Image (cartoon, rainbow, N blue to C red):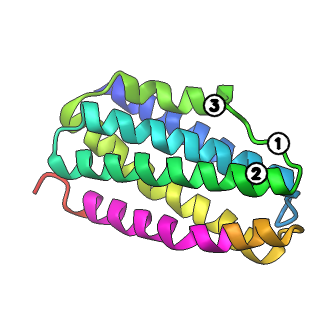
Amino acid sequence: MKRTSVLFVSCAFLAALTWAKADQHKGKMTDQDFVNFAAQTDMMEAHLGQLAQQQGATQAVKDFGQTLTTDHTNDYNQLTAVAGKASLSVPKGLDAVHNKMIAPFEKLHGAAFDKRFEHEMVTGHEAAIAVYKRESTEAQNADLKAYATQALPVLQKHLSDAEDLAKNHGK
């Protein structure tokens, strides 16, 4: 139990660090900063979705994992196309911070995985939505602004689904 609490606090800290890094510009992210943030988020969510399909206990978590994998892979591909038009580079792999965020999930299975996953999906999507909302109005590149606007409903649906999972946990 104590180890799970330490892992949870560590992951929460890393998540907060990542979102704080994205928020460090106080609404003035460059387009490249946003592309980096969005790409890292997409890759991490797709990876966690795969883990949910393999290690989750409930069918609802496994199904949500499939949705995350599909949606965030599609989103990453759209981001790559938009960023290419804007001459911005897209990260091709997870950075060290995001790898550290994923690592604890790789050790969890069943109900323990589900509980942690549900919580992280709520907090992660809340933070991502805030960044995407800001970029949908403040991005310098019009195509990137349109991309952020287009991605928001999917992120909001993920948040709603994650909240439902967390609310119904153990029922």
Dot in front, 1 or 2: 1
> Contact (CB < 8 A) between labels 3 and 2?
no
Q: Can you name the residue that lies furthest to the bottom here?
A: 137
Instruction: Give the overall secondary structure of the magenta segment.
Output: helix
Q: Earlier in the sequence, mark 3 or mark 1?
A: 1
> Contact (CB < 8 A) between labels 1 and 2?
yes
The boundaries of the magenta stretch are 148-166
**Residue that mark 1 sits on:** 89
Q: Is mark 3 on a helix, strand or loop?
A: loop
Name the side, left or right, on which 118 lies relative to 169: right
x and y percentages locating residue 115 in the rendered image: 28, 44
Q: Earlier in the sequence, mark 3 or mark 2?
A: 2
Q: Residue at x 42, y 38 (%)?
A: 48
**Residue that mark 3 sits on:** 94
Above or below residue 6? Residue 141 is below
Task: Name which residue type carries label 1.
Answer: Ser
Quarter holding residue 106: top left
Magenta stretch containing residue 161, yes or no? yes
Above or below residue 106? Residue 74 is below
x and y percentages locating residue 52 in the rendered image: 31, 39
Name the side, left or right, on which 76 lies relative to 105: right
- As measured in the structure, the alpha-carbon distance from the residue carrying label 3 to the one carrying label 2 is 13 Å
Q: Residue at x 33, y 47 (%)?
A: 66
x and y percentages locating residue 27 in the rendered image: 82, 67
Check the picture and name the quadrant holding the C terminus.
Answer: bottom left
Q: Which residue is drawn at 49% across and 31% down?
A: 102
Task: Name which residue type carries label 3.
Answer: Leu
Numbered label tally: 3
**Residue that mark 2 sits on:** 35
Magenta stretch containing residue 125, yes or no? no
User: Which mark, by number, is residue 74?
Assistant: none
- As measured in the structure, the alpha-carbon distance from the residue carrying label 1 to the one carrying label 2 is 8 Å
